[in-house]
Image (cartoon, helix red, strand yellow):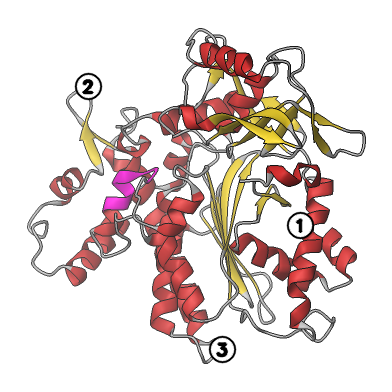
Amino acid sequence: MIDLNNIEKYRENNRIEAKKATGGLPKSLWETYSSFANTLGGIILLGVEEYRDKSLHPVNLPDPDELIEEFWEIANDIQKVSTNILSYEDVYIQNVEEKRIVVITVPKARRFDRPVYLDGSIHNSYRRNGEGDYRCTPEQINAMVRDSEVKTQDMNIIENLPTSVLNLDSVHSYRIKMSSVKPNNRFENLSDKEFLHTIGATGIGEDLLLHPTAAGLLMFGKAKFIKREYPSYCLEYKESSRNNKNYKISSDTNSNCENLYDFFFNVFEKISSDIKLTTNKKLDINLVTTALREALANCLINADYYGENGIVIVNEDEGITISNPGGFRVELDAARAGGISDPRNTAIMRMFNLIGIGSNNGCGVSNIFSVWKSHGLVPPVIEENFEPESITLKLSFVSNDSSDNSDSYTKHPDDESARQDTVISYITDNVTVTSKEISELLGVSHKKSKQILHHLMAKDFVIIRNGKYTLKA
């Protein structure tokens, strides 16, 4: 929540919108309402004027009570707004500098309510970026519609494909792993056909024949058939290290990892073997590799395979970056706290669970943060991008108190608070910034500027979007 008593310190950004509103309720308010609801949420300030220097100042509203009454009348009109996601506590009058303004706190809409659109047309859905509100593309609307369904997309039966598109080598390997994790399980005596149907990898179509489900196709299918259903499907693992700068595993180039199952174990084997060779002897290898296994599984379970980007895993000397298409289905704060499970691909999650990978208790992200904290490592960073939608998790193997003698920041730890205040003020003035700009502002190395920004992200002061940093309202 912003400090309204110091409103002049703030600037409009991707979570703050000011409107003078002295002539009545602005029509553009509803585009902002839609954009905040469909993006990260935000605060609309009525009775606040933006000066030429971008600073915000309250004005005298003729009748704020009448504005609120009119607001609720429109907010509850489904001909104007597809759904009202606000409670009465979200809209109130605040005294600022002896002037009364109206504060409207718009939360990020639940996935069941997105997209929030205007004037009875789903095409009037908006998103927010640092420069204002923009109309959603058809791809963004389709992604929100897919996520709004109760039944997850991976449960759908792909009726235009036969079960022969599944790779039986992958299936047999999966069954062997299941037997090692759960000996004498109830699936052991089933034929492959019965087994695949029982775990949800195949289903009966309208022609009364068996076909792969989306989960079965993604988990065990052959790449060329997966691409027929998911044109942007791509699984990629890269290494960039002192010893090997060109190592790559990809569903396009390596027939041994054309589906999610094979890719997962190929990549996890590489990552876990590298961790065991790490020079950081303080790491508890079992805890860290378990956390990495969960992070990799979460990436595959929560990806939107109809999205524009593919899965990309980058393994570097000082950390691992894991990216998947699709946005968050729960609030980031809730994911970090744990206890809320809302996977994008429920059937794929269950298939991983059957071989002892992951859980459905919603604690995957919080466990990763806990492991990194217990090892004193730089906190994980989660980036949510919207153009196109994707999630990136950055896991660093660098100690949180490591020194970098290339600049004065680590030599004077007492200056940390002042430097962070400087960064916050700079972002407030400029809405979005890059780590390079912060490096130049503070006179520190690029590596150190990113560390400072990551500390602010860990405190929930700053978020990153499309590679740029902005304030979290």
- Secondary structure found at label 1: helix
In terms of secondary structure, where does tag 2 sit?
loop
Question: Which of disc 3 and disc 1 is earlier in sequence?
Answer: 3
Going by the numbered disc 1, the residue's amino acid type is Ile
Would you identify the image quadrant in which residue 313 lies? bottom right
Cα distance, mark 2 to mark 1?
58 Å
What residue is shown with label 2? 206
Q: Which residue is mark 3?
A: 280
Give me the disc on residue 424: 1
**Place of residue 11 in the rendered image (x, y in percent of width and height, measured from the top left):** 78, 41
* Residue at x 40% of width, y 51% of height: 301
Q: Is residue 163 above or below residue 297?
A: above
Q: Where residue 13 appears, x then y in whole percent?
A: 74, 40
At label 3, the amino acid type is Asn
- Residue bounds of the magenta highlight: 343-350
Say which label, 2 or 1, has the lower sequence index: 2
